[in-house]
Image (tube, coloured by chain):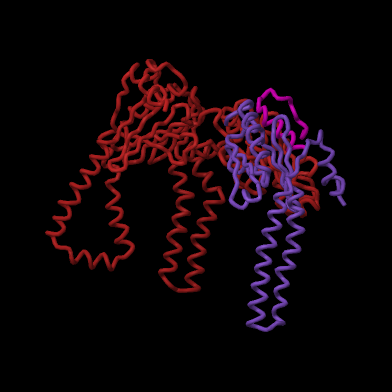
Amino acid sequence: METGSPENTGTAGDERAVTEPEWTGLPPGLLRMRRLLLVVWLGLLAIGLALLLGTLAGPGWAAFALLPLALMAWGWVMIGRNWRSWRYAERADDLLISRGVLWREETVVPYGRMQLVEVTSGPVERHFGLASVQLHTAAAATDATIPGLDPAEAERLRDRLTELGEARSAGL
Amino acid sequence: MTTPGVDDAVREKRPVTERRLHPVTPLRRAWAPVAVVIGWAAHDPDQAQRQLTRLTTTTLLIALAVVVPAAALYGFLTWWFTHFAVTDTELRIRTGLVFRRTAHIRLERIQAIDVTQPLLARVAGVAKLKLDVIGTDKKDELAFLGAEEARTLRAELLARAAGFAPETAHEVGEAPSTQLLRVPPGVLAVSLVLSGATWGTLAAALVVPTVLWLATESVWTVLATAVPLFGAAGASSVGRFVTEYDWTVGEAPDGLRLDHGLLDRAHETVPPGRVQTVRIVEPLLWRRRGWVRVELDVAGSANSVLLPVAPREVAESVVTRVLPGVTVPAGAAVSRPPRRAARCVPVWWRGYGLAVTDAVFAARTGLLRRSLALVPHAKVQSVRLAQGPWQRLWGVADVHVDTGANKTVTARLRDAAEAAQLLRAQAARSRTGRRDARPDRWMA
């Protein structure tokens, strides 16, 4: 293999980088919510499919209802991995958000560039006691969202980010 | 709640004088009904013919007697009810006959003011004033003003935005500009002949209808594809020649002045310090002559071309004026991705490149048509590192830099460790964005 094989340069290099910031993971509420939604929707689909195929095509065909169940098992694992991959770090001057398992993405937003910090919470999220924080800069491509936070933590983060943003405001 | 009080205070000091637009304004949309009729006739000739034969002279006269005064009255009333006024802090535009609209444009939010003169407006001696304001998608415009009035108003608005005293603002006049460069028409013509877009669209316009004719032998299908294709070919060659004709760049205290156009004259200003991204584009056939095209992105502005064609050294000196303190990285300073990037993007990976100086983040893309995008560190809004599974296998990653003009500049397929380091370093550089930040030439 060529110089600098992936084994040496991949995540190992990432870990080596200067001072590793203090990462914060997401609370387990989001994992619970996503898994519950997955089980409910795919469970309903499996039951519906089994009943439909069982009555119309014969009991043998009802075995196809196992497909959504397999999907559910796979989704269960995927959601877990995805949830574990989300993490953020508040550093002295910028916010780091890292996410993704296969398609990894790491975003850095300097506090001075924040135009607006939003806390959103949909009806389902509210039921599970969750809220997400979204950061807007002057660039629309900046996609800095932290989902599934505890509402108190979300508000603390919003207030802190706004305060830091004002202190370091750099405008356009 | 506080605004009325402030307004009163302002009004006490100096009464706001409201002005109207130039009296030819009502005629600006006079062509619209004619165009609609012609469009309808062209779209459905048989129907138009039948309708025309049914029209008698009397009905025609009655229609004219109703339509013309009604249109004239509408035109007159919209003009009558459109006022604008310049106060110490705002430009106010009141308009609308049925739906009233009042726009208060804060002078310090104005990014740029362009004076444009469409062909007919040049004949009538009037001009249009276009305002680029932060945070608005739609351009507010004052159309039309007398050509001289437009220039003085523009100068006054910019002087007030720059903070001159209100009493003297209208006397400051247009800042004098010194001409930096003028693109000769011959060079422009040759550059268009040598650009791939011209030949590409022309080839498409010739080949596609021929193939369709052989396949379908239907005249209408051929016409329906040939007309838009030839239109595109014309727009990319003749159209560009007409808009970019006599391109003049001048330097003034309030920014770079761009004057151009064969039929429609445009007079634009690129304010310094508002430029988010500059792209130096080098098509394949221009390379032997050492010509480049310079494009730019300004937040809230549609201006995108800085120089249609110029020798590289001249272009670089103009870029230095738009991005103060920036030197364009030389070709040798732009480093390619590691060789294993070829596993992710075969052949074309050679076109990618990155150079980071203490003032700019510069990323190159394209193998035949090279394009080098420059982002000053001070304009970076956020930095992202993205890595897909296949890229991780080969230990490479992309670094995206987002700027305020909704443009993202990407350094593709960098070595993963280098990309991670770049992410941190770029965030640190963008945070301060000051030119005196430590010289971080770790890319070398």
Q: Is residue B290 visible?
A: no
In the image, residue A143 sits, relative to residue B142, either above or below, namely: below
Q: Colour of chain A?
A: purple
In the image, residue A169 sits, relative to residue B44, either above or below, namely: above
In the image, residue A59 sits, relative to residue B85, either above or below, namely: below
Quadrant the C terminus of chain B occupies: top right
Q: Is residue B298 left or right of residue B223?
A: right
The span picked out in magenta is B421-444
Q: Colour of chain B?
A: red
Quadrant the N terminus of chain B occupies: top left
Q: Position of residue B315 (x, y in %)?
A: 58, 33
Choose between B305 and B424: the one closer to the eye.
B424
Quarter of the image holding residue B294? top right
Asked if the stretch drawn in magenta spans residue B433, the answer is: yes
Quarter of the image holding residue A56? bottom right
Q: Position of residue B313 (x, y in %)?
A: 61, 32
Q: Is residue A20 left or right of residue B99?
A: right
